[in-house]
Image (tube, rainbow, N blue to C red):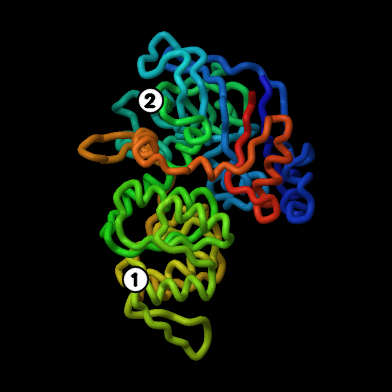
């Protein structure tokens, strides 16, 4: 089968760090260790596994961070290479093992890429607390080898399909997944909507767990798919209060309003005016440094960027005892002023991926909730997808996603067939 594989080595890391800012070929071309390869078909590791034909797979900011070596190295022990990338996967079931009951051949499914204790074939008594709670993205065994792999050897360490040596991701023609990772897609959703279930579920997971007054004002910082998806997620899960979207460009502002924003503002003066107008805050000028605000603020701020600047803004704009939700893949943030974290008794919440949620009296996976909400809301989330590429044009696809200001890309997807 054809698949896009990434092989991480120290020399390639050094070259990518040195040249990545000036030459796309150093991070997206063959010298980087990224290539379109002909690979063996992965075997089913056990009777409760499924073979999938990939229909579409998105390119995520974390994929770009991996390829450009901008992600923190702190997560390196929980990945294994070489790996076929891609974790935003829509697929069709091609073959099921004899013990599979949840899906059948021909079903369209989305794939939870989290590698849980169940995927590692751990008996219930040996499962970690995260997996026992239905939150496999933080599996306590992700740094260990163990469990069946398609090659018949112990499964390599790793926490997600797409960053795993033994379990190919969605940037290829075919892949395998454990039955527990698969979630059927409603027939009412077209492929362009269904492929967004994984990234949209991140916002749904955070919206359900942030637990603030649904009538309170909220601010979402960011112009990418996670930020725009979080706007939709907040509205779809019942947030009724003013919802301000901080976005950079006109096209993103228009889509933000379609997805539920009550107002949009550009970074800088427009965002400040929205803070003062919507929350009643007042601005003060210290002797040295930027303005500070008091007497108002947003009780809920979603930071979907994850830079020093965005988190600094979130801490300045949040209300006393408010909550900052960190969804951007923040790593090492130098010279971040944490004054308002303690002086306003602010709570900062980080969320990773998705899992089992309490929703309308049921315990459901975030993908199932997202699926239902997409059918209910009929929101135009498919507009997030601006570019589609075949596997053979993966370099063009990655360049469009990485240089989104020039290309106009929001979400870029690969279509293997």
Residue beneath disc 2 = 122
Q: Are marks 2 and 1 in contact (CB under 8 Å)?
A: no
- In this rendering, position of residue 210 left or right of residue 303: left
Residue beneath disc 1 = 319
| Residue 221 x %, y % | 48, 61
| Viewer-side residue, 5 vs 74 | 5
Residue 283 seen: yes
Which quadrant of the view contains residue 33?
top right
Q: CA distance from mark 2 to mark 1?
A: 44 Å
Residue ID at (37%, 35%):
375
Mark toward the start of the polypeptide (2 vs 1): 2
| Residue 119 x %, y % | 43, 26
| Residue 295 x %, y % | 32, 79
Toward the bottom, the furthest residue is 287
| Viewer-side residue, 81 vs 238 | 238
The number of numbered discs placed on residues in the rendered structure image is 2
Residue ID at (38%, 25%):
122
Toward the top, the furthest residue is 98
Note whether 340 is above or below 144 in the view shown: below
Local SS, label 2: loop
Q: Identify the disc placed on residue 379.
A: none
Local SS, label 1: strand
Residue ID at (49%, 49%):
226
Residue ID at (73%, 49%):
16
| Viewer-side residue, 339 vs 141 | 339
- Give the number of the mark in front: 2 or 1: 1
Toward the left, the furthest residue is 361
Note whether 22 is above or below 176 in the view shown: below
| Residue 316 x %, y % | 43, 73
């Amino acid at each position: 089968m054809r698949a896009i594989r990434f092989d991480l080595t120290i020399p390639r890391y050094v070259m990518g760090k040195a040249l990545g800012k000036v030459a796309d070929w150093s991070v997206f071309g063959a010298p980087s260790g990224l290539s379109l390869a002909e690979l063996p078909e992965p075997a089913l590791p056990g009777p409760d596994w499924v073979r999938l034909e990939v229909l579409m797979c998105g390119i995520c900011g974390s994929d770009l961070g991996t390829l450009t070596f901008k992600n923190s190295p702190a997560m390196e022990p929980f990945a294994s290479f070489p790996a076929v990338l891609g974790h935003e996967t829509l697929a069709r079931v091609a073959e099921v093992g004899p013990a599979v009951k949840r899906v059948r051949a021909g079903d369209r499914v989305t794939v939870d890429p989290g590698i849980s204790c169940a995927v590692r074939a751990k008996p219930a008594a040996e499962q970690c607390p995260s997996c026992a709670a239905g939150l496999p993205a933080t599996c306590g065994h992700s740094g260990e080898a163990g469990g069946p792999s398609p090659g018949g050897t112990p499964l390599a360490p790793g926490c997600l399909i797409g960053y795993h040596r033994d379990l190919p991701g969605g940037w290829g023609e075919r892949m395998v997944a454990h039955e527990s990772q698969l979630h059927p897609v409603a027939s009412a959703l077209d492929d362009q909507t269904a492929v967004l279930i994984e990234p949209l579920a991140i916002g749904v997971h955070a919206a359900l767990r942030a637990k603030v007054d649904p009538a309170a004002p909220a601010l979402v910082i960011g112009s990418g798919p996670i930020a725009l998806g979080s706007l939709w997620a907040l509205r779809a899960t019942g947030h009724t209060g003013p919802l301000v979207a901080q976005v950079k460009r006109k096209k993103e502002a228009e889509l933000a309003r379609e997805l539920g924003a009550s107002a949009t503002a550009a970074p800088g003066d427009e965002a400040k005016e929205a803070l003062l107008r919507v929350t009643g805050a007042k601005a003060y000028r210290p002797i040295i440094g930027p303005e500070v605000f008091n007497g108002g603020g947003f009780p809920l701020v979603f930071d979907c960027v994850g830079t020093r600047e965005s988190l600094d803004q979130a801490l300045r704009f949040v209300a006393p005892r408010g909550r900052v939700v960190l969804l951007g893949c923040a790593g090492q943030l130098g010279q971040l002023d944490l004054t308002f974290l303690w002086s306003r008794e602010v709570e900062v919440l980080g969320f990773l991926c998705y899992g089992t949620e309490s929703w309308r009296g049921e315990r459901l996976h975030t993908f199932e909730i997202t699926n239902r909400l997409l059918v209910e809301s009929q929101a135009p989330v498919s507009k997030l997808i601006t570019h589609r590429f075949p596997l053979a044009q993966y370099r063009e696809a990655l360049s469009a996603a990485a240089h989104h200001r020039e290309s106009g890309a929001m979400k870029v997807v690969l279509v293997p067939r």
